[in-house]
Amino acid sequence: MNALFGNLTHFGALLFFALVVSLTFAFLSKRGVADRVKYTLWAFLAFLLVAIGIGWLMYPFSQ
Amino acid sequence: MSKRATSMDETMNREAVKGNKIMGIVAALAGWVVPGLGHLVLRRWSKAAVYFLCVGGLACAGLAMRGGVFSAGAQDLFDRLGFFADLGAGAFYFLAHQIQTAGPDVAHATGDYGTRLFAAAGMLNFLTVLEAFDIGRGGEAR
């Protein structure tokens, strides 16, 4: 377990978090396999898009 | 076909487990102690497996990344909120020191991410606990 997660990068942690939370939200809010798969993909991509977008918005303040 | 099969399964589940307030409380408590156990009690097999793997995976990842776990005697508001979030992980919170033998290391970024992942696992489990309560009392959870 330490070998798997111990050296996870910030982006790797983001991918893992986005996938797991999207999957849980899909099971909480949707019924049926097709709806759950669609929702998982949609939420996963939304998490990535928003995180990368906010990252770019904050970039000038890090200089 | 799959939608029909899913709805048939859920109809059978509803017939198998009669909803009432006591069942809701039992399912909620079980789901808090072990993520997914509340849904297992209610015979929601797939939800139980997914919730256990997702909440457990997040919690274990947080601990493996040497994230911090907030304790009950926290002084400031942020730490108290962190304690509340962590407590949601149930057994993973109480076994955190056994799982994380090396102890927390929040001086590095990885440890800080781990702290957030563990808190997220707790909050996610609170949502599944609410759903287990709703299904248990005979509500119309999905």
Image (tube, helix red, strand yellow):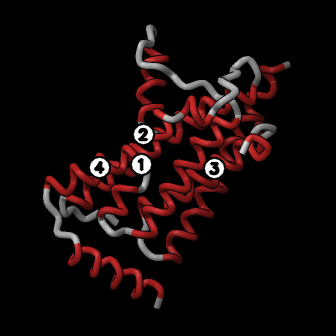
Q: Does B104 sit left or right of B79 as displayed?
A: right
Q: Residue at x 86, y 19 (%)?
A: A63
Mark 1 to mark 3 CA distance (whole Å): 22 Å
In the image, is residue B50 above or below residue A54? below
Q: What subunit carries mark 2?
A: B
Task: Tell me which corner region of the image, top left, top right, bottom left or bottom right, holds residue B6.
Answer: bottom left
Q: Amino acid at mark 3?
A: Ala
Q: Tell me the number on the disc at residue A18.
A: 3
Q: Do discs 1 and 4 belong to a common subunit?
A: yes
Q: Amino acid at mark 2?
A: Gly
Q: Do discs 4 and 3 belong to a common subunit?
A: no
Element class at badge 3:
helix
Q: Does B133 sit left or right of B100 as displayed?
A: left
Q: Which residue is mark 2?
A: B90
Q: Which residue is mark 4?
A: B28
Q: Residue at x 67, y 32 (%)?
A: B113
Callout 1 touching callout 2 (CB < 8 Å)? yes
Quick one: which residue is furthest to the right in this view? A63
Mark 3 to mark 2 CA distance (whole Å): 22 Å
Q: Which residue is mark 1?
A: B34
Q: Amino acid at mark 1?
A: Val
Rendering coords of residue B26 (x, y %)? 23, 51
Q: Residue at x 42, y 37 (%)?
A: B88
For residue A52, say whether it is visible: no
Label located before the other in sequence (1 or 2):
1
Q: Amino acid at mark 4?
A: Ala
Rendering coords of residue B112 (x, y %)? 67, 26
Placement of the C terminus of chain B among the 4 image quadrants: bottom left
